[in-house]
Amino acid sequence: MTPAIHIKETYTNQNSFHIYFSHTGTHKYKNIPKELQTIIQLKAERHEFAGKDTDILHIEQATDKGIGHIVILGLGDEAVHEVKNIRNQISKAVHLARNVKALEIVVHIGTYGKDVQTIVEGVLIGDYSFDTFKGKESQKKHPHVNNVYIETSETAEVKKAVEKGINTASALLLTRDMVNTPASHLHPETLVNYAKEIEKKAQGKVDVTVLNEQECKKLGMGAFLGVAQGSERKPAFIVLHYKGSGTKKFAFVGKSITFDSGGLSLKPSEGMMDMKIDMAGGAAVLGVFDYLASQKPLVSTFSDVYGVLPACENMPSGKAMKPGDVVTAMNGKTVEVLNTDAEGRLALADALVYAETVLKADYIIDMATLTGACMVALGNDLAGLFSNDDAFEKKYAVSAGLAGDDYWRMPLHSAYLAHMKSTIADLKNISTVRYGGAITAAIFLKEFIKKAKWMHIDIAGPAHSDKNGASGWGVLSVIYFLEPITKV
Ligand code: BES
Ligand code: ZN
Ligand code: ZN
């Protein structure tokens, strides 16, 4: 159950879990009740709280009915208004509320009246946990929050911002659910079902087309089908379409390998453990379309927004692709597959060609858990972004900043293409050189783009962490890229 969000001018219940904001510098006590200020002062003197954007001060208060909680969230310098800090800090506070079994939260928004959408997002994200496979006992330990009161007046704008916040957070959390779901319970067909549910919910605003194996074969998607051929499960090439109101066409392509065993180039056990997450790119695409489905016609620069998921499993078997095999992609390029574990670039190759030549996309973002090398380079927090168009990247940087989808731009260093020249085909799917694996993967993909403005985002690092599970990286940034945050 997700918490119900209420808007109330004032709400007083001492036993609730009260959230206030504070800053570094001179204005740090603004909007905080006088009696709390002394406590904060004391904590500040003891260097326990300074209002920094990672600071959280938790005070438990004995009241006549039990224990109330007061949480002061640091937001850093008040002059630097960081939306992602507000979302993050609120979300940490709600997580804390669940740990102390608080069922009711009051958010004293003070000067943050414009940020209702972000606050709602933070609340719902903070309350999230993946409970599908958990027993009742373990669920009882951390009950979900029932009610959240946001202290402000209920204008039409505020109502709209609440609704937006609920829609963006639900999209993100849907993506997290999918990525957290094990491969025993999520197959290419499951992604098809999600897409169809979104189509139903959209009531005419989103249409979904699914190409089966034969249809993909007819289109010449030999690279994608090569990856799929070892599995007992059938592949599905899923295309979603949302009609916008602008002029340019935009396609969002997501790697959708529902399990990556490596194929005959089998992964070692350690490396295979997390490979249910190899569809995180595709799950982000579905998250964004779940949001689009909930919207009134979107005012955007794009006439058409497409989602593309080349969905399959990468499995070894008697039918599987063998190292040394040659496949032909939809644009006619032949690829010598020397490592069946470098499968993402094969599936994406056909998806990119499809997006540019069939859907006629002017702008393409692909998101993929593509390389371990990108994790080596940038760690768990950052995605690696490659683009052939600076303006496109600059625009995306703004929405990624608001979302907290952190990334580092990497070079499309074309000289490395020489390391993927095959003696018997146009390309090899791996480089002869061991280093720079995230870059060579991106350079490989670039061979399947003609003139579209394109961004490849390698999310192998931030898509998932052992501690927190799936992150939903990319969902919020792409949503804000398509439609700015609603400010009250
Ligand atoms: N899905 C993996 C990449 C990956 C690794 C994602 C770890 C998330 C966490 C991808 O298909 C893969 O196996 N890549 C190989 C490429 C190599 C064979 C050139 C890799 O990174 O080792
Ligand atoms: Zn792989
Ligand atoms: Zn993979």
Image (tube, grey):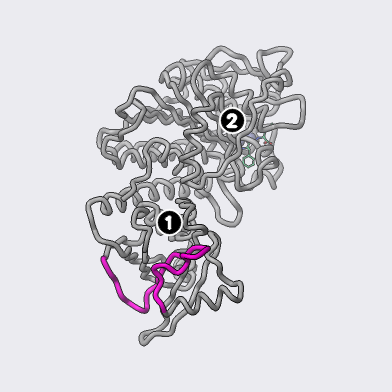
x 42%, y 67%: residue? 30
Disc 1/disc 2 C-alpha distance (Å):
29 Å
Q: Is residue 465 above or below residue 98?
A: above
Q: Secondary structure at mark 1?
A: helix
Q: Position of residue 441 (x, y in %)?
A: 64, 28
Image quadrant of ligand 3 equals top right
Q: Is residue 29 magenta?
A: yes
Q: Are marks 1 and 2 in contact (CB under 8 Å)?
A: no
Q: Is residue 11 magenta?
A: yes
Q: Position of residue 324 (x, y in %)?
A: 70, 21
x 59%, y 75%: residue? 45
Q: Earlier in the sequence, mark 1 or mark 2?
A: 1
Furthest residue toward bottom: 64
Q: Relative to 401, is 106 on the left or the right?
A: left
Residue at label 1? 122
What span is in magenta? Answer: 9-34
x 55%, y 62%: residue? 52
Residue at label 2? 386
Helix, strand or loop for the magenta stretch, by majority: loop
